[in-house]
């Protein structure tokens, strides 16, 4: 099953929000819980996936960004990230309460759920100032743009996973 991580937020005087090196940032850390596709067990701890980190898949010549066994039923699953499908969350998308795709995942035996916004985000103000290394783990971000003489804020963070082809 292929899943796309979709994000949205309320942006105040921010024109775009994305990982600090773009949507295909090889070192951006994605944190979420995993659900076993066989028994439905939800992992207790968050799992971290990073595009630049891969591991060999069992009984295969390929690699995946995650190979994990379910602690309940002992079935193994994999998740492989597919770059090139994401784009920044833009102000006009945010104003309509719509979502922007961030990353696509090829999931086999596992399903990502409950994405956690964390560190490593970048935002551009309406005045053109770029704010780097934003930490959204607290649920919001507020700063002052001196160039535009205006406050900037990112709040009401939302995410969802959508099945795709």
Image: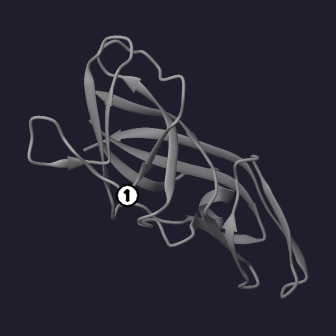
Q: As drawn, is 125 to the left or to the right of 117?
A: right
Q: Which residue is denoted by mark 1 in the rendering?
A: 51
Q: Residue furthest bottom?
A: 147
Q: Position of residue 78 (x, y in %)?
A: 27, 36
Work out whether 131 lies above or below 75. Answer: below
Q: Measuring 53% from the left and 34% from the top, which residue is drawn there?
A: 46
Q: Position of residue 142 (x, y in %)?
A: 84, 62
Quadrant containing the N terminus in the rendered view? top left
Q: As drawn, is 127 to the left or to the right of 38?
A: right
Work out whether 164 lies above or below 23. Answer: above
Q: Measuring 37% from the left and 31% from the top, which residue is drawn there?
A: 111
Work out whether 22 lies above or below 103. Answer: below
Q: Position of residue 155 (x, y in %)?
A: 76, 52
Quadrant containing the C terminus in the rendered view? top left
The scheme the figure's colours follow is one colour
| Residue 115 or residue 77, whichever sits in front | 77
Q: Is residue 62 visible?
A: yes
Q: Measuring 68% from the left and 47% from the top, which residue is drawn there?
A: 157
| Residue 57 or residue 109, whichever sits in front | 57
Q: Measuring 38% from the left and 11% from the top, which residue is drawn there?
A: 72
| Residue 102 or residue 45, whichever sits in front | 45
Q: Is residue 98 visible?
A: no
Q: Secondary structure at mark 1?
A: loop
Give the number of marks. Answer: 1
Q: As drawn, is 92 to the left or to the right of 24?
A: right
Label 1 packing within 10 angstroms: few (<14), some (14-19), many (20+)? many
Work out whether 136 lies above or below 15. Answer: above
Image quadrant in which you'd find residue 149? bottom right
Q: Position of residue 125 (x, y in %)?
A: 73, 77
């Amino acid at each position: 099953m292929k899943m796309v991580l979709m994000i949205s937020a309320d942006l105040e005087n921010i024109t775009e929000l994305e990982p600090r090196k773009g949507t295909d940032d090889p070192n951006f850390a994605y944190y979420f819980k995993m659900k076993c596709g066989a028994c439905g067990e939800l992992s207790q701890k968050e799992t971290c996936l990073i595009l630049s980190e891969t591991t060999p898949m069992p009984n295969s010549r390929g690699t995946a960004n995650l190979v994990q066994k379910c602690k309940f039923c002992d079935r193994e699953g994999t998740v492989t990230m597919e770059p090139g499908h994401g784009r920044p969350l833009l102000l006009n998308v945010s104003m309509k309460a719509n979502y922007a795709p961030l990353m696509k995942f090829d999931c086999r035996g596992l399903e990502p759920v409950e994405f956690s916004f964390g560190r490593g985000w970048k935002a551009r103000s309406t005045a053109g100032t770029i704010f780097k290394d934003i930490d959204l783990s607290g649920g919001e971000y507020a700063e002052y743009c001196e160039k535009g003489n205006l406050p900037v804020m990112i709040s009401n963070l939302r995410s969802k996973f959508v099945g795709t082809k």
